[in-house]
Amino acid sequence: MNATEMSSLLRFVANKMIASEPELTRLDMAVGDGDHGVGMQRGFTAVEKLLSQAPGQAEDIGVLLTRVGTELMSSMGGASGAIFGTLFRAGGKSLTGETVLTTPLLTRFLSSGLDAVCKRGGAKPGDKTMVDALAAAAAASQSLGSEPLYAALPKIARAAGQGAEGTKQMVAAFGRAKALGERSIGHPDPGAVSMSLILSFMAEGIKRHEPVAL
């Protein structure tokens, strides 16, 4: 998947994330401030606009992903903007100079992004944050390096979904949900759900491309 194809895929993901605002808002109203969905909608609206104006035919995939991260960080604001922006910026910078996304490079993106997010926010797996979905995706990706991207990505997305689902049984360690204590049990973390959705939409969108090109 080259930079042009990656830009098209990210526009698909952006539109799907924009449409997910009501669900993400509903989830955040149970454990947070109720603004997570609107923040994600705002961020991915900015990303969609960025990519529609500058598809990035001449860019490498690292530059493209880094630009997406910068746009998320500047448009979303708050903790979610910082965290998701950091994921894309750090992951993108780890791919600078690369021109074709493969499963091993996606693994590098996820692992580098995970390290940066953990350092920036201080969260770790088990704290009921987006890290739980991201860490699960990174771990799954590590074992799929020999598979083509179109085959590996759905499995990585499923792992992220399982990570997000697992947050239902956790007590929150960050944000407003932390104040709820054990009352946060039974509710998934909205950030973890967003992380799983991003990868799920990537897996859905990649089906538009011929496997031979990936």
Image (tube, grey):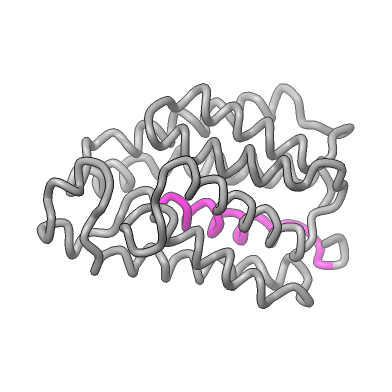
Q: Nearer the viewer, residue 64 or 150?
A: 64
Which one is in front, 188 or 176?
Answer: 176
Which residue shows up at 17% across the image and 63% down it? 185
Residue at (47%, 58%) from the top-left corner?
196
- Residue 19, compared with residue 111, is above or below; it is above
First to last magenta residue range: 193-211
Q: Can you give x and y, in whole percent of width and height, for residue 98 in the image?
A: 85, 47
Up the image or down, 47 lies above or below 27; here it is above
As drawn, 95 above or below 59: below
47 falls in the magenta region: no
Give the residue displayed 59% in from the left and 49% down from the top: 113
Question: Does 202 appear in magenta?
Answer: yes
Dividing the picture into quadrants, the one containing residue 183 is: bottom left
**Majority secondary structure of the magenta segment?**
helix
Q: How many marks?
A: 0
Left or right of residue 195: residue 89: right
Q: Position of residue 107 (x, y in %)?
A: 68, 62
Residue 14 position, x and y percent, is 56, 39
Q: Is residue 62 left or right of residue 89?
A: right
Q: Indicate the position of residue 1 as horizontal and vertical percent values.
A: 81, 53
